[in-house]
Image (cartoon, rainbow, N blue to C red):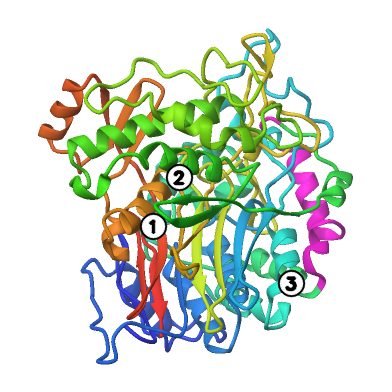
Amino acid sequence: MRGMIMAIGGKGKFALSSRLDLGFSVGSAAMQRIMFSALMAVAVVIMQAQAAGLPRKHMIASSHPLATEAGAQVLKRGGSALDAAIAAQLVMGLVEPQSSGIGGGAFLLHWDAKVKKVESYDGRETAPLAAGPDLFLGPDGKPMPFMMTVVGGKSVGVPGVMAMLEMAHREHGALPWASLFAPAIALAENGFPVSERLAAAIAADPAIAMIPETAAYFRPNGVALKAGDIVVNKAYAQSLIALRDQGAKALVEGPLAQAIIETVRTAPLNPGGMTLGDLASYRPIKREPVCGTYRKHRICSMGLPSSGAVTMLQTLAFLERHRLAVLPPGGAQEVHLYGEASRLAYADRDAYLGDPEAMTVAVKDMLAPGYLTARGALIRRDQALPEVQPGAPGAVPARKRAMLDYSRPSTAHVSVKDAAGNAVALTTTVEGLFGSHLMAGGFILNNQLTDFSFSPVRDGLPHPNAPGPQKRPLSAMSPSLVFAPNGSLKAIVGSPGGWRIITYVTRTIMGLIDWRMDAKSAVALIHVTGRNKTLEVEAGRAEPALIEALTAKGHTVKSQEMMSGLNIIRLAPEGLDGAADPRREGSVWGE
């Protein structure tokens, strides 16, 4: 296991030797065959741990094996956790363009082991100055159909991921900024193999054909890329070189910035109003992380405009009165209790959360012990609640009903622990699969503005997540750090998956704490999501007996595919225990 990519992941499961140095050319036919064989191996190759046991020095878990390898190379050169996360993200933007990249946004949590401090960085996209509350209202004043707004320039927010990573690197980088770009540039110039997941996403998305430049890349000569095809992306390499040499300023001025604005404003569908001024005005924000306790463990996650920390900490608080450790994980009683806690937390999330500059409800009120105790007392052990309404935190009158968002499952995540004990949890996205479907500079532009509420007013009150100039839309991304009762770092956790991200991360943390699971078992827990009237259970994992038992308790149960992509590092006494989600194609490296 030491010094190796560990075999974990869904389709395309494999183990890849860390001897593949992505700083050099991978363009030869022989190397392409090696990479293809590694990426496309159907059998799971489980590498036996060395006699010394689990890795102890450093580890990285990411959404794609080539990204994991890039981060591993950085760690082996003495790079920090932040350095490795940047190198991995630059590769993910190339090999998983449907999920994240330069044209998107991100949230990052950093643990500084020396000073014992958690810091959080907000790289969420912002709305252009031209975006008003009526951004997604049609001529009749009614919200436009979601799928009619995704493709094109109207949905594109000002990208923030590179400015945020640059800010974090100034504070926590160990290697030069420019050195972190070599693996991604080499792959872009010399070629990378299309994974099964990317190929399936291309084949399933008819909107790709609507944008000529995007179709030319993903469907050359009208034929969709297939798994194993070797793809060269010279434009992405040039964008990386500009960012390497100029920093995030390359996205503000110069040819790359011009290309982004021209692409958005001249989009063949739904052209947008973004300007160079919008790019120049973007600022990443260093925010206070939101932390709480669960069974004497400290849980820290991303605050607003992410709803992750608030919703997760509410859910855990509602559950703390119940002895989950004595219940079988995934059993009817445990799923019932979790589903009810989730429904209560999501009702508050959907009603009250948005850009922190526009909210009328204080986070401290939503996490106040008295409020959480009263709200959690609504849960009945043997009977599901009827339709769940939002609570009334603080002095704000309760909303009459929840306000649902439209965020779609996509995104990517990387967890890193370095030799100095520092840690990074980075979740990054272009929102939906292939974002806006527009490409500039060899990368996808996000459709993040569709994370705003399409209705600026609901029940006669302004929506906290309504569009507006320079506002940041609500997110569910939940990069998280878990600390043991003695204050030591216990786990680094995060996942893609749209609005369900919060439940994926929450249940993984429960697995670690309530049932004392190892990383692999915690990641493999059955997914459950409660939201409004519906209790979703993971398709293919929920037995008929479970569904029958939940139905008998009054739940409206839906079997739902839930494509998470959890990446976790658990710090155990015996070493570093990492796992990547078997539902996707991620991997783990450590030594």
- Taking 435 as reference, is 440 left or right? right
Helix, strand or loop status at disc 1? loop
Q: Position of residue 384 (x, y in %)?
A: 28, 22
Q: How many marks?
A: 3
Q: Residues within 10 Å of mark 3 (few under 14, many from 20)?
A: few
Helix, strand or loop status at disc 3? helix
Judged from this view, the residue extending furthest toward the left is 545
Closer to the chain start, of discs 2 and 1, is 1
Regarding residue 291, the answer to whether it shows in the image is: yes
Q: Position of residue 470 (x, y in %)?
A: 79, 38
Q: Position of residue 386 (x, y in %)?
A: 34, 15
Q: Position of residue 59 (x, y in %)?
A: 45, 77
**Magenta stretch: residue 268 in it?**
yes
**Which residue is identified by label 1?**
226
Closer to the chain start, of discs 2 and 3, is 3
Q: Residues within 10 Å of mark 2 (few under 14, many from 20)?
A: many
Residue 501 image label: 2
By secondary structure, the bulk of the magenta-drawn segment is best described as: helix
Q: Nearer the viewer, residue 518 or 232?
A: 518
- Taking 73 as reference, is 519 left or right? left
Q: Are marks 2 and 1 in contact (CB under 8 Å)?
A: no
User: Could you tell me the amino acid type at mark 1?
Assistant: Lys
Q: Nearer the viewer, residue 275 or 316?
A: 316
User: Could you tell me the amino acid type at mark 2?
Assistant: Ile
